[in-house]
Amino acid sequence: MQILTPRVFWAQRHGEIYLRVELSDARNLHISLQENTLQFKAQGHGAKGENEYEFRLEFLESVRHEVQHKSTPRQVDVRIRKQQRRWWERLTLQQKKPQFLAPDFDRWLDESDAETELQAKEEEKINKISVESRVHKDPYVGLKKGYFFMYNLVQFLGFSWIFVNMTVRLLILGEDSFYDTFNATADMMYFCQMMATIEVINPLLGLVKTGFFPAMIQVAGRNVILFVIFGSLDQMQNKPVVFFVFYLWSAIEIFRYPFYMLACVGTEWKLLTWLRYSLWIPLYPLGIVAEAIAVIQSLPVFDETRLFSLPLPAALGGSLSFSFMLQIYLVFMFLGLFINFQHLYKLRRRRYRPRKHKVQ
C-alpha cells in the first residue's frame, strides 16, 4: 500500500522549528517525537484528496521532546523547541531534502535576520522592564476606578430613564408626546447635564488623559441649550424640537457611558464598543442640527422679551440683544461640531486602525 505524504513547509528561529502541514480538516492526529525523530500521522484532505497521510522527519540536531500543535480547517501547525539555541544549516539529518518538504516563506528568515529579530525582542524586553521599574504604581488606582465606575453608572441610568420614558410616551401618545417632553423629562436631564460638568473637571485634575476642550465644547454647548434656550423660555418648552434634542442626546449616551463603565472593570463587549465608536457619526451631527433649530426658534422670543439683553449707552444703541449673541453662538456651534467631529474620528481611527502582523 502506497504511503501518502502531505506537503510540509518549515522555518526556524534560534530556539524553535515551525512546521506547517497542508492537510485540511485533519482528524485522528498522531504526532510524536522519539529519539530526535518526528512522526506524523492523520486523516484529512491533502494533495491526494481525502486519505490518511503520514511522514517522518529525523532532525539534524537534538530537540526537546515537547511538541505543540494546532489544527485549523486549512492546515496543522507544529512547533518544536531545539535543545540548544543555535542556527541549523538544514532541517534533517539526511543531506538530501525530502520531496514533500519545502521552506515556509511566510515565516522564513535567514540567520542574520533572525538574529536581528532576536536582538530587537531582547531590547524591547529590557526597555519594558526599565520603563516598569521607573513607573510608580498609583496607590489610588482602585479608588479612581470606583469613582469612574459609579459616575458612568449613574449617568447611564439617568439617560436610560430619559430614553425609555420618551420611547414609551412616543409609542403610546404618538406625536402628542413631542409637546410635553420638557415637563416629563427636564428634571432628569437637568441632573444628568449638571453631573456632566465633572467630565470637564476630570482632565483639569489629571484624572483622565482625554482633552479638556472637546469635553468643554460638548458640555457647555448642551447646557446653553438646556438651561438658557429651554429652561429660561416657557415658549420653547412645548416645541417638538425639545423632543428631538433630548432623544438624540440620550441615544448617544446610553451606549457611551456603559462602554466606559465596563472599561473600569477591564471588560469589553465588541458590539457595545462598535456602537460607542460608530453611532456618533449620524447622531452627533443630527444633534447639532436639532440644537441649531432650537436656537433659531428662540431668536424671536428673545427679541420680544429682551431677556438677557445687555444695557448699553444710548450712543451705542441702548442695548445689545441676546438674540444677536445667539446668532454669533450659532457660528461657534458648528465650529465646535467640526472640532469634536475630528476628535471623535481620531478616536475611532485609533481604535479600529489595521494592525501590522509581525513575522513569528
Image (cartoon, rainbow, N blue to C red):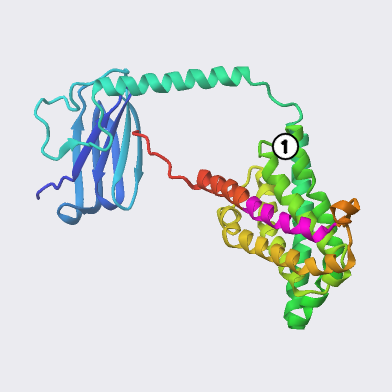
Q: Is residue 44 left or right of residue 157?
A: left
What's the residue type where badge 1 is placed? Pro
| Vertical relation: 296 (above or below) 330 | below
Find out whether residue 349 is within the magenta segment. no
Residue range in magenta is 320-337
Q: Is the C terminus in the top left, top right, bottom left or bottom right quadrant?
A: top left
Question: Which residue corresponds to the image point at 16% horizontal and 52% vertical from the top-left?
Answer: 47
Q: Answer above or below: position of 89 versus 5.
A: above
- What is the magenta segment's predominant secondary structure? helix
Circle 1 residue: 203
- Residue 34 picture location, percent across and down: 27, 30
In front: 45, or 317? 317
Image point (72%, 62%), residue name: 250
Q: What percent of the width, then of the height, locates residue 141? A: 73, 32
Q: Is residue 57 above or below residue 307?
A: above
Q: Is residue 360 above or below residue 302?
A: above
Residue shown at the point (85%, 52%) measured from the top left: 316
Q: Image point 28% across, 34% down: which residue?
A: 107
Q: Nearer the viewer, residue 337 or 194?
A: 337
In the picture, residue 253 is in which quadrant?
bottom right
Q: Secondary structure at mark 1?
A: helix
